[in-house]
Amino acid sequence: MTSAAAYEATIGLEVHVQLRTASKLFCGCANEFGAPPNTLTCPVCLGHPGSLPVLNGEAILLGLRAAAALDCSLPAMIRFDRKNYFYPDLPKGFQISQHSGAVGLDGAVEYWDEEGGGTVAVERVHLEEDTAKAVHAEAYVRPGETLLDFNRSGVPLMEVVSRPVITSPEMARRYIVAVRQTLIDVGVSDCGLEKGAFRIDTNISVKPKGEAKLGEQVEIKNLNSIRAMEAALEYEFERQREILAGGGKVERVTLHYDDATGETTPTRFKEVRADYRYFAEPDLPPVALPASYVEKVRADDFAPPAARIRELREGYDTTLAEAEMLAFAPAYYDFLGRAAAAYGGERRAVVNWLVGDVTRELKERGEELADAKLTPEGLASLLKLLDAGEVNVPGAREVLAALMNEGGDPAALLEAKGLGQISDAGALEELVRAAAAANPKAVADLRAGKERARGALVGYVMKETKGRANPQIVNELITKVIAAGD
Ligand SMILES: [Zn+2]
């Protein structure tokens, strides 16, 4: 019997990303999602014979910027090719794509996980035009019919192709999250999965562990969420392992993943690459990119998302989940950096307050951090008051709530609200003695070594001081009073 661990997966990923340009790739029609069907069209993007494409320079810039952020080498010349195939969503009979003149080659994407992460090699980044959209599910489509919406036809699409070096569905997810975040960070796309602005194709083959020759490759097309991609790969890894373990042969097919059943089913037999009959697009001459232009794209001081995760994990002692929350919410990331700099104390304390009390308060108010009256400097001042013993934790929480309501200076709020911590040992000792007199049983229990009885005395003092007593001093005084035996 062969166990699951005796097999390994080889996974490659292709991501299609719609670029955030004002107009389409080869015409002046608006690049917009959600307009009424077939209202954003012209002869070029409808594929009328004789219409001529005009290249959108903004799309080239965004493509190059993305390629640079994915650590690709940038070309001196870009070209477009015709990829010939027939499909109802492509009336021209060809798609204008980049076969040989891509905007980026040989990149690398760093991903992160609990074990420190790793790197996935990117083969290429190229541009192409999106196709029209086949519409089945809308209310205005009769059963059994398919309608075509050409608003999407000609929208600039960027394809990021990984090398087949991914070895598990989880690693595939980590890589995709890193790619998506990188593209959002450099502003080339909003990568909205629900709008179809970020679509994933994947291929997976399985072979006995240690075997040099790759297994037969199976493709899964049009995955519309990262979760669906991971689930589809897990299902397919398992399916192929079972076939191989049973002595069978995996067939080379293209599969569709059904989100509802969690299973893959064959769509059509794979077209071979040569079938596309690529040739240089005769209506678009190659574009030479001046070195100074390429340098400018590259010079962007861009820190990849994995670097921010590392900074937060190592410099702020965060968990991975905290780092992901802080690194990819710009308002939080900026706030944290400024608050830590203003505070100067233990950075972990700033994280605790930010992901704990501050986030909880924001949620209760239905507010965003960017709109709150709390400033990084205000939080830093509050933490300094805590460190100095001027306020205890419950008092600090009240000051925080006030800071979020009205802003202002924490020390002044402390004063105005009478929340300052009482650390005067003389005053507190009197209260501790009163607590002892009022709770003879607790005193007897404490003397008998039952530490839990301490709570009654602390509670008494806190009630008398409206929670403002310094708990550390109160505890020291209780110990002293009990030991004195009077
Ligand atoms: Zn158009």
Image (cartoon, rainbow, N blue to C red):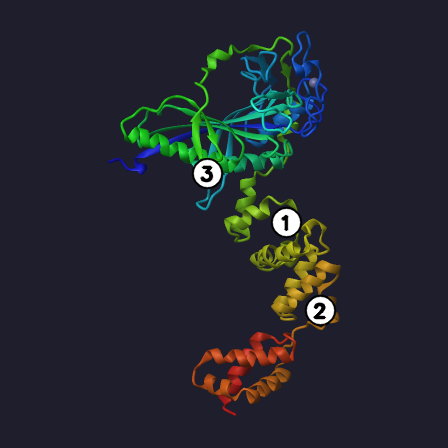
Earlier-in-chain disc, 3 versus 2: 3
Query: Where does label 1 land, which residue?
Result: 332
Number of marks present in the image shown: 3
Image coordinates of residue 264 in percent, x first then y, are 43, 30
* Amino acid under disc 3: Gly
* Amino acid under disc 1: Tyr
Query: Where does label 2 land, which residue?
Result: 414
User: Which labelled disc corresponds to residue 118?
Assistant: 3
Question: Is label 1 in contact with label 2 (beta carbons under 8 Å)?
Answer: no
Camera-side mark, 3 or 2: 2
- Does any portion of residue 462 appear in the rendered image? yes
* Amino acid under disc 2: Leu
User: Which labelled disc corresponds to residue 398?
Assistant: none
Front-most of residues 453 and 238: 238
Res. 74 image quadrant: top right
Task: Kindly identify the residue that appears in the image at 44 percent across and 81 percent down.
Answer: 450
Q: Residue furthest front?
A: 143
**In the figure, 71 relative to 434: above or below?**
above
User: What is the distance, in whole Å, between disc 1 and disc 2 at their CAs?
Assistant: 25 Å
- Looking at the rendered structure, the secondary structure element under dot 1 is helix
